[in-house]
Image (tube, rainbow, N blue to C red):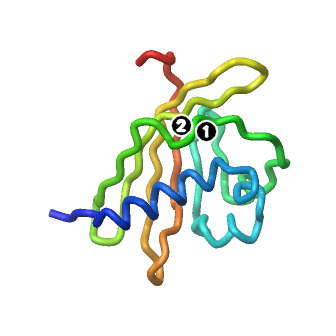
Amino acid sequence: MFELAPEEIDALRSLEEALWREETRFDRAWMRAVLAPDFFEFGRSGRIYQLEDTLAVERQPIRVVLPLPAFRARLIASEVAQVTYDSAVTSDGVVQHAHRSSIWSRCNGSWQLRFHQGTPFGGGT
């Protein structure tokens, strides 16, 4: 069975949280280093985002609860991890909740995000 070391879990948590921080989320060089060339996302809205769509998002304030609630990370193959957590993002005064899942692969000693999905849910679930 594969298992992540505590420092690997911390690294993945830091990467996921950096994706929610304005200073890193809208830094194209950082995003290109972190997102795999074949990255795609099923957004909370249901929209599908490819790498270039994600990089093209205009800078905007991000109001999210950090640290990420219910954060978990597990290896699903020797060099592939799945991260799950819940997000609570405030937009136009409304808190939007989503269950999140990301697939990260280790490339040359660094983690790259290959896939992400957000599924909306009612706040108490």
Depth check: 14 or 59 in front? 14
Picture coordinates of residue 103, whole percent (x, y): 44, 56
Question: Which quadrant: the N terminus?
Answer: bottom left
Q: Secondary structure at mark 1?
A: loop
Amino acid on which disc 1 is placed: Gly
Depth check: 108 or 18 in front? 18
Depth check: 3 or 32 in front? 3
Q: Residue at x 53, y 25 (%)?
A: 120
State the separation of the CA atoms marked 2 and 1: 5 Å
The residue that disc 2 covers is 118
Q: Residue at x 37, y 66 (%)?
A: 8
Residue 12 found in image quarter: bottom left
Picture coordinates of residue 45, whole percent (x, y): 64, 30
Depth check: 8 or 47 in front? 8
Residue 6 found in image quarter: bottom left
Amino acid on which disc 2 is placed: Gly
Q: Which residue is at the far bottom? A: 108
Mark 2 packing: few (<14 Cα in 10 Å), some, or many (20+)?
A: many
The residue that disc 1 covers is 43
Picture coordinates of residue 31, whole percent (x, y): 68, 64
State left or right for residue 48 relative to residue 4: right
Mark 2 and mark 1 residues within 8 Å of each other at the beta carbon? yes
Picture coordinates of residue 90, whole percent (x, y): 69, 27
Say above or below: 6 vs 95.
below
Q: Residue at x 36, y 67 (%)?
A: 7
Q: Secondary structure at mark 2?
A: strand
Q: Residue at x 47, y 83 (%)?
A: 108
Question: Which quadrant: the C terminus?
Answer: top left
Mark 1 packing: few (<14 Cα in 10 Å), some, or many (20+)?
A: some
